[in-house]
Image (cartoon, helix red, strand yellow):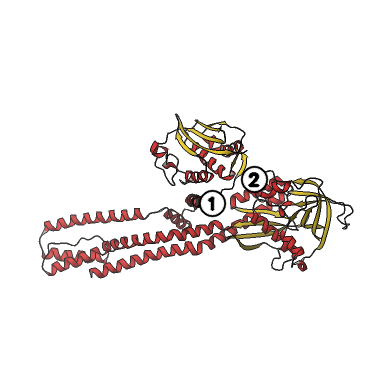
Amino acid sequence: MKKGIVLKLFLLTTALCTLILAIIFIGQTLFFKQYYENRKVNDVKASIQTFENEYKKNEYDTPAIRKMEENFYLHHTSWITTLDSSGNIKNTKDFILEIQLDSSSQNNEFSGRLIQIPLYSFIALEDVERVAFFLEQGNRIIIDGAQQGNTILPAILTIEKENVVLENRQLSELFYGKQTSRVSGSPLYLTGHITNVQLPEQMVGANFIYANHVLIDRIKQFQVDLITNDSSHHFDSTEIMDFKENGVSYKIIVKPIKDSKGEINYIFTLTSLQPVDEAVQMIKDYYVYLIIFVFLLIVLVSLYYSKKIAQPLLQINKTTEKIADLDFSEMIPVTTNDEIGHLSQNINILSKTLHSYIVELQQDIEKEKQLENTRKEFIAGVSHELKTPLSIMKSCISILEDGVASNKKEYYFQAMAKEIDRMDRLIIDMLELAKFESGTYRMDMDIFYMDEIIEYIIDQLSLDISKKQLHVHQSLSTIKVVANQSRIEQVLTNFISNAIRYTPEKEDIFVSMVVEEEHVKICIENKGVHIAPDHLVRIWDRFYRGDISRQQAKEGTGLGLAISKNILELHGVPYGVTNTKEGVLFYFSLKKSV
């Protein structure tokens, strides 16, 4: 009996726990991706409707529309823009080529007209500086393309003087390749001269759409589908398309709308599914180790748990064997009020009737109380050890599903969102750190003014600075440096954020630039608690929080300094941290631009 019941309970508990682990693994690896995609598409579609309503109110306000597009990207990590009836991006006046057509043009309809051609279809944003030299006012230009209604669809631009050819490859292949028979317009050949050129002045901000090669290529392909009247895409209602490029999956959502003139426009949205692909792969890799560890834990806990559950029955068996031998010296502890407890109680009554050892019986009762306390302590200990951050989310979900405390629904949603945000920030930082530590990441270099970047970061963090009433003192020089601008912004944001976090209220932060012979040293010093000397080196380690005196703020993921370290090492520049007389100084150097 002893081996039988313990073995059965052990197998049942192990099987149940393993089944739960398997269900969690299958749910997260097989169904999570589909759930994420559906949720992502539904959220984006709902936001597109809001974007459409705001767009109609600000149809002719280009800055407002650009701001809407940037906000859409920040909230959904999805690119959005509006296209006209020909598939061209609207509001591209900052990236156009203005051409005065010759009056002697063979096409009388366009003779002498002043036309504007969107340059994003011909020039990648990183090639602007290289090509801008050839796009001078007055240069003669030849336009090859097609005419669709009253619209010119240029495919090839030839600058006569420089013998430079700019090509929209998608339209060029359509007009002059094997698909010529599918074109609904007529061929067009025009000449003229350049009257004006508008090129983006910066690579970030409002121009971020031009920098996305995938988005621009898909817009060009969409234009081809419109021109060829592709039967597989009618675009008369919201349409969702899938495609994959460089191993990354994307969703395209196209919604037709009418502008104030009654013409058909299109809201074009591109969403990357790369984060969920990487997250699912990380989950699979993580579970390889987790399953091994948890399975061993299940086996040990199940064995211990089974013995504890079977203990009353084993005790009954042991005591009845003694009674059979006329040994009434031992009583059975009664710890439950079920059938097993009743059986134990009856046996004890029989034992008391047959035996008169009252003192021994009292000792057994005291022992029963001690065993009861031991059992409670055991259950409390096991329950405490099994609790995880996920139990918070599961509890909130259960409460919301049952409709309990509906007046606190927002509270439970915020609790779940806080846990999810913390896990999301951690995953993003871990992915970022893994990318830098992979040994394959290549750091592209830019040339920019360091003082402008510092002022920009401080401005972005002004709200946090104001909350603590801090005084930020700047000592900057107008110097160009050679580095990856976006990554240096990330390092600065992390260093200055740390300074804000650990500086007492109403104290000072000093941001300075020290110009050296070939380098510029950037220093961020804050007044506050020193870092212990033995922690100054280990502070760059991931998840390291050894310095107790500086653990007053733990809202970060513990990866910020590790990421900054990898960025600076990829730049091959010196960096470090040191204690000053009144606080802590973080610093790094960058090479000056010639």
Q: Which residue is pictured at 44% across the width and 62% down the height? A: 24
Q: Which residue is pictured at 50% across the width and 57% down the height? A: 279
User: In the figure, residue 344 lies in which quadrant?
Assistant: bottom left
Q: Quadrant of the image for the N terminus? A: bottom left
The answer to whether residue 259 shows anywhere in this view is no
The secondary structure type at the circle numbered 1 is: loop
User: In the figure, residue 591 lies in which quadrant?
Assistant: top right
User: In the figure, residue 261 lies in which quadrant?
Assistant: bottom right
Q: Which residue is mark 1?
A: 441
* Position of residue 258 measured from the top left corner of the image (x, y, whole percent): 74, 57
* Position of residue 355 measured from the top left corner of the image (x, y, whole percent): 10, 63
Binning the other alpha carbons within 10 Å of mark 1 as few (below 14), some (14 to 19) or many (20 upward) gives: few
Q: Nearer the viewer, mark 2 or mark 1?
A: 1
Q: Earlier in the sequence, mark 2 or mark 1?
A: 2
Q: Choose between 199 and 241: the one closer to the eye.
A: 199
Q: Which three-letter amino acid code belongs to the residue tagged 2?
A: Gly
- Residue lying furthest top in this view? 581
Binning the other alpha carbons within 10 Å of mark 2 as few (below 14), some (14 to 19) or many (20 upward) gives: few
The answer to whether residue 548 shows anywhere in this view is yes
Q: Which residue is mark 2?
A: 205
Question: As drawn, is 126 to the left or to the right of 416?
Answer: right
Q: CA distance from mark 2 to mark 1?
A: 24 Å
